[in-house]
Image (tube, rainbow, N blue to C red):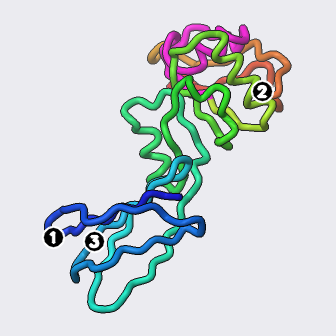
């Protein structure tokens, strides 16, 4: 089950910790009146926090956990994950150890220039086999971002003159691969000015 923690807010003191039963139920007894913060955690789900005010009567809550659907590979300071979660998506940072267990995700965002050709090929193979979407993010720097890793692994897209304020940025040489389905052979992703 999920782990549930309760903190008495007046003293910022944890006053209880328990696990839910097989039906997701839990109980805390003998609590003082006042404001509490409940935190519910379970692997594979977003952390949920609920503030509740207790009085003399029992309180019944329904707390729904949201399954994590997006893994962010290379999340600098957790900023992308935080942005996605703040905007209603359920995401978590991941690293290359996710290989072999990608089936927990509907989308993996690749936002790193660190990784080997073999890691990238395995990621593409696993996600292709399982119908998981991949999104490669990059920067304008040639050696930064995931596009560089994709080119290293597959030989395309070919990067050329991608620097800051150096004109239009065009991707060329996209081969026949399901990752690039419905994309033209060459297309501009940034126009000068």
- When the figure is inspected, residue 30 is found, relative to residue 68, above or below; the finding is below
Q: Position of residue 155 (x, y in %)?
A: 72, 8
Identify residue for label 3.
36
Tag 1 residue: 10
Marks 3 & 2, CB-CB < 8 Å contact: no
Side (left or right) of 129 relative to 108:
right
Secondary structure under tag 3 reads: strand
Q: Looking at this view, name the residue that lies furthest to the bottom.
A: 57
Contact between labelled residues 1 and 3, with CB atoms less than 8 Å apart: no
Q: Nearer the viewer, residue 166 or 16?
A: 16
Q: Residues within 10 Å of mark 1 (few under 14, many from 20)?
A: few
Per the model, the C-alpha gap separating discs 3 and 1 is: 8 Å
Tell me if label 1 and label 2 are in contact, CB under 8 Å.
Answer: no
First in residue order: circle 3 vs circle 1: 1
Q: Residue at x 81, y 31 (%)?
A: 129
Q: Residue at x 44, y 57 (%)?
A: 3
Residue located farthest toward the right when viewing the structure as drawn? 176
Residue 68, percent from left and from top: 57, 49
Label 2: state its secondary structure.
Answer: helix
Give the side of residue 123 with respect to residue 43, left or right: right
Secondary structure, magenta segment, majority class: loop
Marked residue nearer the N-terminal end (3 or 2): 3
Q: Residue 52 location, x and y as percent?
A: 33, 76
Please give the label number shown on residue 19. none
- What secondary structure is marked by label 1? loop
Question: In this rendering, is residue 77 above or below 116?
Answer: below
Q: Quadrant of residue 110?
A: top right
Range drawn in magenta: 136-162
Query: Residue 122 in magenta?
Result: no
The residue under label 2 is 180
């Amino acid at each position: 089950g999920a782990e549930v923690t309760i903190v008495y807010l007046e003293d910022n003191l944890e006053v209880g910790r328990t696990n839910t039963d097989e039906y997701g139920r839990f109980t805390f007894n003998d609590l003082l009146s006042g404001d509490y913060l409940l935190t519910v955690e379970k692997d594979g789900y977003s952390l949920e926090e609920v503030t509740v005010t207790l009085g003399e009567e029992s309180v019944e809550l329904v707390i729904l956990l949201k399954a994590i659907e997006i893994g962010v590979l290379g999340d600098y300071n957790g900023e992308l994950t935080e942005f996605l979660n703040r905007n209603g998506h359920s995401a978590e940072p991941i690293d290359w150890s996710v290989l072999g267990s990608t089936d927990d995700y509907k989308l993996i965002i690749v936002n790193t220039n660190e990784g080997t050709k073999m890691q990238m090929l395995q990621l593409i193979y696993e996600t292709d086999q399982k119908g998981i979407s991949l999104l490669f993010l990059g920067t304008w720097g040639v050696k930064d971002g995931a596009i560089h890793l994709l080119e290293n692994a597959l030989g395309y897209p070919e990067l050329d003159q991608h620097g800051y304020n150096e004109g239009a940025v065009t991707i060329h040489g996209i081969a026949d691969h399901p990752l690039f389905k419905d994309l033209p052979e060459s297309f501009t992703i940034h126009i000068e000015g």
